[in-house]
């Protein structure tokens, strides 16, 4: 599609849009557009317009107009994505779902919730926990990101090691397709085999095949008890080995987060959590279940960590301590800018038994390319955030970083892993996707995209 994003045609579009969405929710002023030009990558591209629908009917009307006037539409949740997915790289309309933020129903009998896409993930957590239920997907951005964005990115989080990610909790969705058709896959049934699984197809497609306007989510009973442990190791290798050994001994913790030496320097600077001076790697482990189960599992986990050389294994004994531990973990993403102004944040994943090899690969790259790399993440799933800290104004440094990242991806694929464990592909990783899926894989994805979106209206310039 030739995106006719000229000032004149966007004025025509704005005028047309105000016939289907109230004028105060169609914004063309530069200040407002600027606020919707970014995501967490700090990539920037100004949209022509920002539209705030409040119903699926309005979304349908906007998408139909965008087709008529040949404008891209870019769905957006909270803009916390790490791959430029909600950045309007080809201009057009940013369609912010933030006002469609109602929790429509929490059905305790069937253990499901029905929500609009703009519900903030942490608000859903609070609402279901208040009635004794549990929604496990918990990306570290949960205080800000939306459930719709989570579904579009198939988000995971610390608890995914035991409970799986967003993909495993989406039972059904309503979505507006790129041609303005409305698709309802709604059902509260926990299983069904009725033709293609269209809800599953939409999950993880980063807003390129449909705009999710409602979700039916699976819930679980809230676990009776949770216990949090900190295990400090004198080296990265011991911590990495303890991860797969813990799980192979039949204790699946509900969280198993890893931090490398540079992360620990940041945690020490951030304060709130004291660590032994000799600690060079840390695991945050959490077990849940009944009181008795939790006590037994915590002891087994601690034992495995000691066998792999942990110099200290501590139970976070108060709610305040647990909060401080997770606060320090969640603060890492921002604290990293103390190291350098630009972060290249990769979220590679390998089979967890190959985590020790992955940490060695990262160390070698840091040394060979002389780059500060901060590494932490959801080790229980073999998913590490490899943060190459650079300065985007330093061209030679950026070139070295790019080469290191390309090598990292090749190594990850060699280790039978993936270039993205949770952030998706968006803009920043599209050049690397062929390393993993090959040209044949890209071609199949292109054909699926074309079948849904022959005019290239929805979130163009992403993934491929
Ligand atoms: C500090 C920090 C920590 C993070 N930790 C994690 C983590 O632990 N795990 C993890 O998986 N991610 C993590 N992320 C990345 C990010 O938060 C997730 O990808 C999240 O799911 C994005 O949600 P969002 O509402 O911000 O979506 P956005 O960033 O607004 O959009 C992301 C993508 O989804 C599409 N989209 C958004 N809403 C819809 C919709 N309703 N219908 C169709 N498409 C839509 C957009 O077009 C875009 O392609 C983190 C980010 C930050 C900044």
Image (spheres, rainbow, N blue to C red):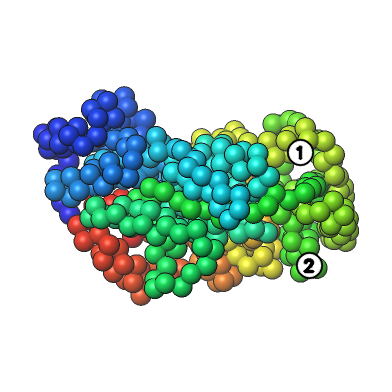
Task: Choose the circle earlier in sequence order: 1 or 2.
Answer: 2
As drawn, 251 above or below 461: below
Q: Nearer the viewer, residue 186 or 48?
A: 186
- SS at badge 2: loop
73 with respect to 142 (left or right): left
Quadrant into which the C terminus falls: bottom left
Residue at 36% from the left image edge and 57% from the top image edge: 184
Q: Nearer the viewer, residue 96 or 464?
A: 96
How far is the residue under mark 1 from the one under mark 2?
A: 24 Å
304 with respect to 92 (left or right): right
Disc 1 crowd, CA 10 A, few/some/many (<14, 14-19, 20+): some
Q: Which residue is mark 1?
A: 322
Quadrant into which the N terminus falls: bottom left
346 with respect to 367 (left or right): left
Mark drawn on residue 114? none
Residue at 26% from the left image edge and 47% from the top image edge: 60
Task: Tell how many labels.
Answer: 2
Tell me the quarter of the picture where residue 239 sits: bottom right
Disc 2 crowd, CA 10 A, few/some/many (<14, 14-19, 20+): few
314 with respect to 457 (left or right): right
Q: Which residue is mark 2?
A: 250
Q: Is residue 366 visible?
A: no
Q: Is residue 117 visible?
A: yes
Residue 191 percent coordinates (x, y)? 52, 67
Residue 459 percent coordinates (x, y)? 31, 50
Tell me the quarter of the picture where residue 187 sits: bottom left
Q: Is mark 2 within 8 Å of ligand 1?
A: no
Residue at 78% from the left image edge and 67% from the top image edge: 250
Residue 123 percent coordinates (x, y)? 56, 37
- SS at badge 1: helix
Q: Nearer the viewer, residue 149 or 383?
A: 149
């Amino acid at each position: 599609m030739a995106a006719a994003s000229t000032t004149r045609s966007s004025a025509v579009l704005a005028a047309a849009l105000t016939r289907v969405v109230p004028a105060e929710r169609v914004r063309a002023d530069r200040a407002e557009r600027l606020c919707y030009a970014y995501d967490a990558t700090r990539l920037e591209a100004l949209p022509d317009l920002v539209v705030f629908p409040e119903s699926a009917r309005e979304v349908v009307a906007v998408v139909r107009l965008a087709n008529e006037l040949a404008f891209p539409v870019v769905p957006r949740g909270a803009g916390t994505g790490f791959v430029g997915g909600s950045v309007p790289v080809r201009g057009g309309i940013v369609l912010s779902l933030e006002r469609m933020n109602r929790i429509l129903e929490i059905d305790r009998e069937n253990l499901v919730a029905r929500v609009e896409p703009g519900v903030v993930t942490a608000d859903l957590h609070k609402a279901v926990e208040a009635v004794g239920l549990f929604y496990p997907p918990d990306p570290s951005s949960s205080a800000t990101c939306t459930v719709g964005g989570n579904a579009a990115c198939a988000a995971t989080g610390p608890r995914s090691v035991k409970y799986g990610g967003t993909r495993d909790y989406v039972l059904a969705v309503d979505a507006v397709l790129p041609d303005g058709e409305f698709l309802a896959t709604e059902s509260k049934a926990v299983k069904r085999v009725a033709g293609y699984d269209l809800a599953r197809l939409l999950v993880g497609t980063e807003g390129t095949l449909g705009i999710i306007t409602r979700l039916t989510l699976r819930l679980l009973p809230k676990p009776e008890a949770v216990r949090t442990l900190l295990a400090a190791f004198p080296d990265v290798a011991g911590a990495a080995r303890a991860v797969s050994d813990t799980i192979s001994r039949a204790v699946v913790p509900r969280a198993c987060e890893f931090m490398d030496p540079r992360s620990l320097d940041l945690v020490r600077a951030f304060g709130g959590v004291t660590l032994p001076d000799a600690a060079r790697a840390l695991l945050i482990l959490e077990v849940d279940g009944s009181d008795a189960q939790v006590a037994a599992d915590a002891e087994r986990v601690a034992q495995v960590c000691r066998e792999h050389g942990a110099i200290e294994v501590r139970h976070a004994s108060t709610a305040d301590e647990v909060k401080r531990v997770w606060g320090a973990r969640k603060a890492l993403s921002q604290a990293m800018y103390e190291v350098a102004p630009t972060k290249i944040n990769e979220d590679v994943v390998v089979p967890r038994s190959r985590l020790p090899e992955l940490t060695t690969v990262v160390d070698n790259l840091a040394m060979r390319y002389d780059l500060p790399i901060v590494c932490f993440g959801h080790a229980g799933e073999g998913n590490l955030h490899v943060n190459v800290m650079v300065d985007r104004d330093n061209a030679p440094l950026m070139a070295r970083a790019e080469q290191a990242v390309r090598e990292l991806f090749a190594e990850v694929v060699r280790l039978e892993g993936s270039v993205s464990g949770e952030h998706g592909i968006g803009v920043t990783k599209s050049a690397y996707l062929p390393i993993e899926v090959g040209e044949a894989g890209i071609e199949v994805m292109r054909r699926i995209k074309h079948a849904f979106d022959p005019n290239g209206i929805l979130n163009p310039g992403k993934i491929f």
